[in-house]
Image (cartoon, rainbow, N blue to C red):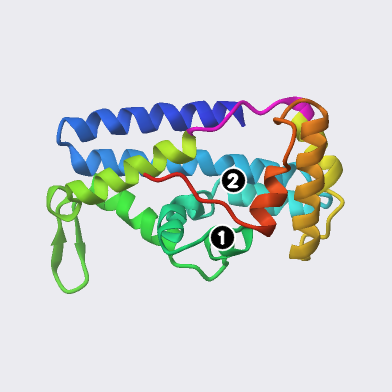
């Protein structure tokens, strides 16, 4: 997880450098790769609580799937539209959602020329503009800016999240709250208010990009 986070930040920083030189298509595509790398962390958490051969196989399949790893890229857009609670983020992981495929296509459009539809040629420097590139780079940097994951954190994750039925969203929310409290007790999160409980029940403002 830490290796994925570090590599995601490296890619995001490289994308920022490309953005600053005006290489917008390459910056956008590299940012998309960074977002995918950040997405590995949640999949590895999922793998840590897998209890059957089928769940393990599904987790590794998601780990190697570009679209499964980039589901978070729409987070800033949801925040702008008013998302504040965990419940508001469920569209990010909807199995029928189109946004993961859109980012994967944007990544390809930033790297390659192609002929699409009815003889429409796609040229990276024309298709990917500065605004799109800047937005993706900012999102990549936001998602890559995570603290180090410790062994104790994952042990607590397995202990609390692993017990919750994966199809019961309310049970998962309660498990997240108890996990965060255990993290506080272990000194891995700041004491006082349970920020996860506050996020789930009351909502919080997401960082602006």
Q: In which quarter of the image is the C terminus?
A: top left
Q: At x 62% / y 51%, what residue is drawn?
A: 61
Residue 28 screen position, x and y as percent: 29, 44
Which quadrant holds residue 147?
Answer: top right
What residue range appears in magenta? Answer: 145-152
First in residue order: circle 2 vs circle 1: 2
Q: How many marks?
A: 2
Q: At x 87% / y 51%, what residue is drawn?
A: 163
Residue neighbourhood size for the residue with mark 2, other residues' Cα within 10 Å, grouped as few (<14), some (14–19), many (≥20): many
Q: Judge left or right: residue 119 versus residue 193.
A: left
Residue 44 screen position, x and y as percent: 66, 41
Is residue 139 shown in magenta?
no
Residue neighbourhood size for the residue with mark 1, other residues' Cα within 10 Å, grouped as few (<14), some (14–19), many (≥20): some
Residue 134 screen position, x and y as percent: 26, 43
CA–CA distance in space, label 2 to label 1: 20 Å
Placement of 23 over or under 123, stated as above or below: above
Secondary element type, mark 2: helix
Q: At x 81% / y 41%, what residue is drawn?
A: 158
Placement of 84 over or under 1, stated as above or below: below
Q: Main secondary structure of the magenta part?
A: loop
Q: At x 81% / y 60%, what residue is drawn?
A: 171
Check contact, mark 2 vs mark 1: CB within 8 A: no
* Residue 66 seen by the camera: no
Residue 164 screen position, x and y as percent: 84, 55
Q: Judge left or right: residue 168 versus residue 140.
A: right
Foreground of the two, 138 or 50: 138
Secondary element type, mark 1: helix
Foreground of the two, 168 or 30: 168
Q: Name the residue under label 1.
A: 89
Q: Residue 63 carries which label?
A: 2
Q: Which tag is nearer the camera, tag 2 or tag 1?
A: 1
């Amino acid at each position: 997880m830490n290796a994925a986070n570090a590599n995601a930040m490296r890619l995001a920083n490289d994308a920022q450098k490309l953005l600053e030189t005006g290489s917008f298509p390459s910056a956008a595509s590299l940012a998309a790769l960074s977002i995918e790398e950040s997405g590995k962390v949640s999949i590895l958490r999922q793998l840590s609580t897998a209890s059957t051969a089928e769940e393990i196989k599904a987790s590794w399949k998601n780990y190697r799937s570009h679209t499964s790893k980039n589901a978070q890229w729409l987070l800033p857009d949801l925040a702008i539209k008013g998302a504040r609670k965990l419940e508001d983020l469920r569209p990010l992981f909807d199995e029928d959602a189109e946004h993961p495929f859109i980012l994967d296509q944007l990544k390809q459009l930033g790297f390659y020329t192609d002929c699409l539809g009815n003889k429409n040629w796609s040229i990276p420097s024309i298709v990917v503009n500065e605004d799109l590139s800047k937005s993706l780079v900012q999102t990549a940097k936001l998602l890559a800016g995570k603290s180090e994951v410790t062994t104790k954190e994952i042990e607590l994750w397995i202990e609390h999240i692993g017990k919750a039925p994966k199809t019961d969203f309310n049970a998962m929310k309660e498990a997240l709250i108890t996990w965060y409290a255990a993290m506080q007790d272990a000194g891995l999160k700041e004491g006082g208010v349970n920020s996860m409980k506050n996020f789930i029940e009351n909502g919080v403002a997401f960082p602006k990009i």
